[in-house]
């Protein structure tokens, strides 16, 4: 049958050449669109590296020295620190509080990129080093517990917090080991090894590795992140610097916690010149932060869905009309003893064989688009190879489905036509 199909395709080469060109173009366009969508949706399915369930940001302020309510007797730096520590202690009394932390430019959905380039050093004496840019985030050890950040090698948030507290260790995200210039670091094979980080040209600090830390739900983790313990739970630290106070609340007691804070604001939660003035869930920050991004994604996905539907229906229509135009051929084959199953296999086999023949050429064209950086992504710079391959398979299956449906429905109608009537009409 394959030989007969190839002979038939060769005999009708003009019509089939145009069909092959159409399938080639459709295959490349559909793959391009799928890669754009797939790369965006895949980011939404992964973990951002933390869990914001039940996490709240407690806003605070310091009374201005010119204000009427300013307490001059508590205006020195030492008193401000004492008052802030007392305020933190009182917040820990709130119902449902599981953990509390202080940080600087560390909470998610914050686009701060302050950082530095530093050197990772293997501690086994091999002399291996890796330079990397890190986004710097100052946190108290309990921040890891508040954000429920687990270690890459299975460490619990509590174990990581203890590591930072006892050893003044630092936590780096796993993408610190991704380096396009050094082949051996393209995979996380070395993540389980012991490393130190060098800073101030001479001082080193022990490290543990945590998962990638995304800035939001749609962007990949481009920059490596480093969490540093700078005694924010201890002294010295200065409340005027605008640190972040975060608390993790038992989800079942969030309403109780919010009611307690609202009740105590202006009284119990005011200590000296320091007072609580706001309470916001990280989830609401996430929602507001991503409003524009979410609208952009929804608009793009709507456009892509319309485009994909148009391509699919157009291709289905092409095979539909192609099959309708071959009613006479179908009648002749039936007169010569061919069964409906045999005719369907021939018609569908012809379309699928042409599709299969042009697929390698389409894949080559897709590869050229990737190599020339002509593929446009919404929030990432590239996609892994498996995503390209997955989109290629989905593209082939969607086009094959259009071919089968475009032949099946008009083909069934053509089979019901009496051969004599069909030949007379021809």
Image (cartoon, helix red, strand yellow):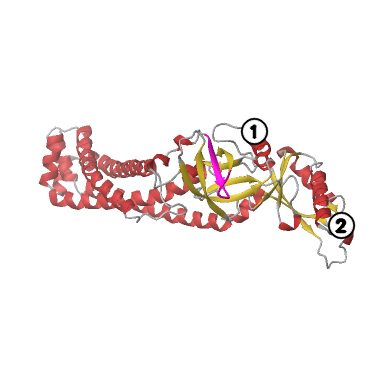
Residue at 56%, 58% in the rendered image: 292
Furthest residue to the front?
202
The residue that label 2 is drawn on is 74
Residue at 66%, 49% in the rendered image: 282
Q: Main secondary structure of the magenta part?
A: strand
Label 2: state its secondary structure: helix
Q: Position of residue 342 (x, y in %)?
A: 20, 33
The mark nearer the N terminus, 1 or 2, is 2
Query: In this rendering, does residue 225 appear at all?
Result: yes
The residue that label 1 is drawn on is 159
Q: Position of residue 216 (x, y in %)?
A: 56, 50
**Does residue 133 appear left or right of residue 274 in this picture?**
left
Mark 2 is surrounded, within 10 Å at the Cα level, by few (under 14), some (14 to 19) or many (20 or more) other residues, namely some
Question: Is residue 200 shown in magenta?
Answer: yes
Mark 1 is surrounded, within 10 Å at the Cα level, by few (under 14), some (14 to 19) or many (20 or more) other residues, namely some
Q: Is residue 164 above or below residue 240?
A: above
Residue at 13%, 40% in the rendered image: 6
- The magenta region covers 194-203
**Does residue 142 appear left or right of residue 387 in this picture?**
right
**Does residue 175 appear left or right of residue 248 in this picture?**
left
Question: Is residue 190 shown in magenta?
Answer: no
Furthest residue to the bottom?
66
Disc 1 versus disc 2: distance between alpha carbons? Answer: 37 Å
Find out whether the residues at labels 1 and 2 contact each other: C-beta distance under 8 Å: no
Q: Position of residue 145 (x, y in %)?
A: 67, 38
153 and 265: which is toward the camera: 153
Q: Quadrant of the N terminus?
A: top left
96 and 419: which is toward the camera: 96
Label 1: state its secondary structure: helix
Q: How many marks?
A: 2
Q: Position of residue 262 (x, y in %)?
A: 81, 51
């Amino acid at each position: 049958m394959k030989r007969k199909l190839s002979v038939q395709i060769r005999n009708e080469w003009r019509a089939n050449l145009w069909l092959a060109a159409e399938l080639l173009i459709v295959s490349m366009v559909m793959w391009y669109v799928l890669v754009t969508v797939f790369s965006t949706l895949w980011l939404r399915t992964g973990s951002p590296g933390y869990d914001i369930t039940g996490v709240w940001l407690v806003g605070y302020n310091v009374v201005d020295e010119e204000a009427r309510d300013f307490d001059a007797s508590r205006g020195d730096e030492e008193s401000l620190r004492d008052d802030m520590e007392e305020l933190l202690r009182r917040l820990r009394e709130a119902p449902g509080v599981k953990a509390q932390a202080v940080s600087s430019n560390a909470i998610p959905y914050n686009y701060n990129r302050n950082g530095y380039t530093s050197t990772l050093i293997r501690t086994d004496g091999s002399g291996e080093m890796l330079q990397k840019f890190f986004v710097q985030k100052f946190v108290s050890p309990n921040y890891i517990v508040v954000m429920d950040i687990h270690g890459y090698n299975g460490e619990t948030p509590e174990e990581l917090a203890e590591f930072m507290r006892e050893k003044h260790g630092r936590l780096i995200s796993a993408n610190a080991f991704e380096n396009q210039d050094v082949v051996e670091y393209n995979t996380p094979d070395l993540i389980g090894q012991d490393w130190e980080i060098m800073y101030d040209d001479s001082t080193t600090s022990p490290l543990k590795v945590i998962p990638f830390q995304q800035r939001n739900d749609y962007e990949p983790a481009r920059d490596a992140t480093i969490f540093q313990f700078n005694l924010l739970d201890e002294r010295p630290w200065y409340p005027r610097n605008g640190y972040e106070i975060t608390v993790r609340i038992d989800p079942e007691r969030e309403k109780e916690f919010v009611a307690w804070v609202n009740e105590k604001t202006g009284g119990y939660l005011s200590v000296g010149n320091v007072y609580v003035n706001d309470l916001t869930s990280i989830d609401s920050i996430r929602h507001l932060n991503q409003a524009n991004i979410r609208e952009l994604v929804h608009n793009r996905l709507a456009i892509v869905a319309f485009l994909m539907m148009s391509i699919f229906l157009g291709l289905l229509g092409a095979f539909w009309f192609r099959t309708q135009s071959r009613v006479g051929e179908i009648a002749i084959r039936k007169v010569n003893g061919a069964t409906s199953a045999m005719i369907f296999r021939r018609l569908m086999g012809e379309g699928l064989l042409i599709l299969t023949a042009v697929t390698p050429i389409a894949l080559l064209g897709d590869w050229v688009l990737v190599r020339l950086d002509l593929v446009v992504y919404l929030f990432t710079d590239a996609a892994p190879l498996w995503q390209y391959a997955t989109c290629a398979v989905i593209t082939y299956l969607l086009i094959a489905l259009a071919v089968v449906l475009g032949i099946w429905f008009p083909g069934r109608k053509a089979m019901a036509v009496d051969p004599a009537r069909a030949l007379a009409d021809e």
